[in-house]
Image: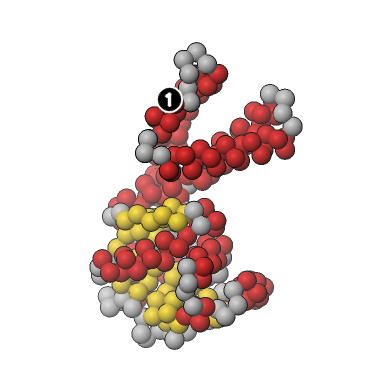
Amino acid sequence: MTSVQFLGGGRMADALLGGLLAAGHSPSDIAVVEISPARRDELISAHPGVAVLSEPGPADALVVATKPGDAVDALATAAAAAPGLCRVLSIAAGVGTAALQAAVGDSVAVVRAMPNTPALVGEGASAICAGPTAVDADLDWAEGLLGAVGTVVRVPERSMDAVTGLSGSGPAYVFLVAEALIDAGVAAGLPRDVADRLTRQTLLGSARLLAESDDGPEALRAAVTSPGGTTAAGLRQLESHAVRAAVIDAVAAATARSAELG
């Protein structure tokens, strides 16, 4: 019996699997269920020693990493094949704990998570919430898994739509800003490869500065903005186009859409 069995071997599952192995988990304690033969071959090559299966088998815990529309049925099927099942962690977006709990019964603890794509490079931001029968020890377990690929916070389930709108969709907002900065650099006369390189490092460095500083974003922005200077001129343009309000509205729209889909 494996300790952790993934249902689905897509990019997010692959990232989490890689994080667990890098953190010292034994490959023999992990299995992945993947229906695509080609994808199974890729997983076998990428993670030697991990059992890659075409159908679920016995396991202590399941990680639901399927498409959201397949999550409940896949979980019910896997639970039937795992009579010793104790815990479930779902990273299927928008699938509530009530539906997941119904698929496995009340004897199994369910934890729902919302990770984001920077988990692919070990810098994810994930939120977790407890299902109807989960206790703190179950959240500790889920946090241990997701902590292998980034930061984890705990929220009530009612906040998961807001998490989706902020950190779940947030990377796309950042990538849009990156696109705009590169295009702006080209428009200002820089070669595209130079604009691309400068943009990537500017975003990376700014994010690291924010993460490691005791100051908040407002103070860090003020520190680089001299009165009457170039940065002040640029910020004045952004404010004239209501960029701050647009970001707030984007998160609100994504949050509302998450609630509709859920």
Residue at 48 percent of width and 18 percent of height: 226
* Residue 180 x %, y %: 61, 33
Query: Mark 1 falls on what kind of element?
Result: helix
Report the front residue among 54 and 2: 2
- Identify whether 86 is placed above or below 200: below
- Identify whether 181 is placed above or below 136: above
Q: Is residue 187 left or right of residue 99?
A: right
Mark 1 = which residue? 222
Report the front residue among 243 and 186: 186
Q: Is residue 154 left or right of residue 47?
A: left
Count of numbered labels shown in the rendering: 1
Q: Residues within 10 Å of mark 1 (few under 14, many from 20)?
A: few
Q: Is residue 33 left or right of residue 261?
A: right
Q: How is the image coloured?
A: secondary structure
* Residue 141 x %, y %: 35, 69
Q: Amino acid at mark 1?
A: Ala
Report the front residue among 260 and 145: 145
* Residue 14 x %, y %: 55, 66
* Residue 25 x %, y %: 47, 74
Report the front residue among 130 and 199: 199
Residue at 28 percent of width and 78 percent of height: 107
